[in-house]
Image (cartoon, rainbow, N blue to C red):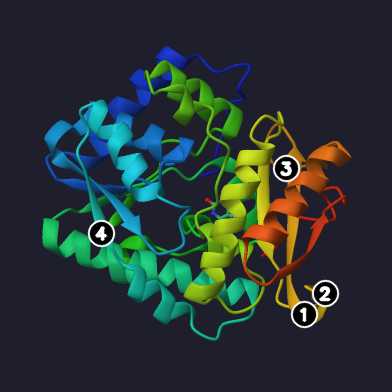
Amino acid sequence: MPIVEITANELDVEKFIKDKTTEISEAAGDDTAINALSGGVDSSTVTLLGHKALGEKLKTYFIDNGLMRKDEPQEVVSIFSKMGVNVEIIDARKEFFAALKDIDDPEKKREAITQTFYKKVFGRLVKESGARHLLQGTILTDVDETVAGIKRQHNVFEQLGIDPQETFGYKIIEPLLQLRKDGVRKVAEGLGLPEVIFNRPPFPGPALAARVIGAVTPEDVELVRQATVIMEEVLGSVNSFQNMAILHKDRVTGMRNNMREFGRQIEIRSWESTDARTATPMRVDYETLFYLADRITKEVQGVVSVTYHIAKKPPSTMEAV
Ligand code: XMP
């Protein structure tokens, strides 16, 4: 069935919340369900909709894949605990790094992450909890880009002809399929989520693996994680859709303490966009960029080059991988 888009303008938040709560209850019936919360606006919205609909019958997990930003698992769990939603952290770091080992190709990296999430980790959680359904926050932009063959988003199945029941052994419920990011933010606010969540900049499902070009290692994820902390501190007040620090695979010649250093490169992207379908680089002022470059090259070991991305989407995409 084709998905009928609900634009942010035409969205009636109260009606949407009521309709989707009913739909989730009807789809899950008396069964238990699970969902994974990453703290992004999509999965946070689904978590609250799901708890409204299913109460104790929904079990929420934070999957620590080793690819999240600094302290993210603990911070997200604490935000939800204040709202009375209990979230269990699942340590799956070893499984994700093992699955990603030596994989260079972007689509194969995404596929490894998808399989590890859906087959291994959710497969195990479904078995342990006796759940028959997984609730998740796929939005229309994820479906569009995957179906168009631009980028395989980690959370799209049915539109690619993949039956989750057959492939993974559980059903998937996707209450946000008709919305884009701007619509989801309105629903999140309507559900009473705090501003740090409803205005949270997007962060992709493959997390920092989407920000390491080439094979993903724990060491390289740690480098891009440190650069991300600094980037978020310095660009925090830039009114953009999304900012990112990306670690390049290629090294370049630099110099430190009068010695040659064949070092690493970080690329910074700051995007202006409304729905992620098209995007334009923000005009971040040079003083801010120089300060950011100084901090990254001083504080992130081995980085000798920092560049700022200036091409639009299209032909770029927002994430580099
Ligand atoms: P791209 O790179 O496709 O990004 O221009 C558009 C928006 O989608 C996010 N993104 C993802 N989100 N799973 C997600 O949940 C993914 O695999 C994925 N890839 C990209 C990206 O951060 C941006 O907001």
Residue 130 vertical position relative to residue 187 in the rendered view, above or below:
below
Residue 56 vertical position relative to residue 191 in the rendered view, above or below:
below
Q: Position of residue 170 (x, y in %)?
A: 27, 59
Relative to 216, is 144 on the left or the right? right
Residue at 60% from the left image edge and 22% from the top image edge: 8
Q: Position of residue 243 (x, y in %)?
A: 67, 44
Q: Nearer the viewer, mark 1 or mark 4?
A: 1
Q: Nearer the viewer, mark 4 or mark 2?
A: 2
Alpha carbon separation for disc pair 1 and 4: 39 Å
- In terms of secondary structure, where does tag 2 sit? strand
Q: Amino acid at mark 3?
A: Arg
- In terms of secondary structure, where does tag 4 sit? strand
Q: Are marks 1 and 3 in contact (CB under 8 Å)?
A: no
Q: Nearer the viewer, residue 188 or 242?
A: 242
Q: Amino acid at mark 4?
A: Ile
Q: Amino acid at mark 1?
A: Glu
Residue 56 vertical position relative to residue 156 in the rendered view, above or below:
above
Alpha carbon separation for disc pair 1 and 3: 39 Å
Residue ID for mark 3: 277
Residue ID for mark 1: 261
Q: Position of residue 36 (x, y in %)?
A: 33, 49
Q: Position of residue 4 (x, y in %)?
A: 57, 33
Q: Are marks 3 and 2 in contact (CB under 8 Å)?
A: no
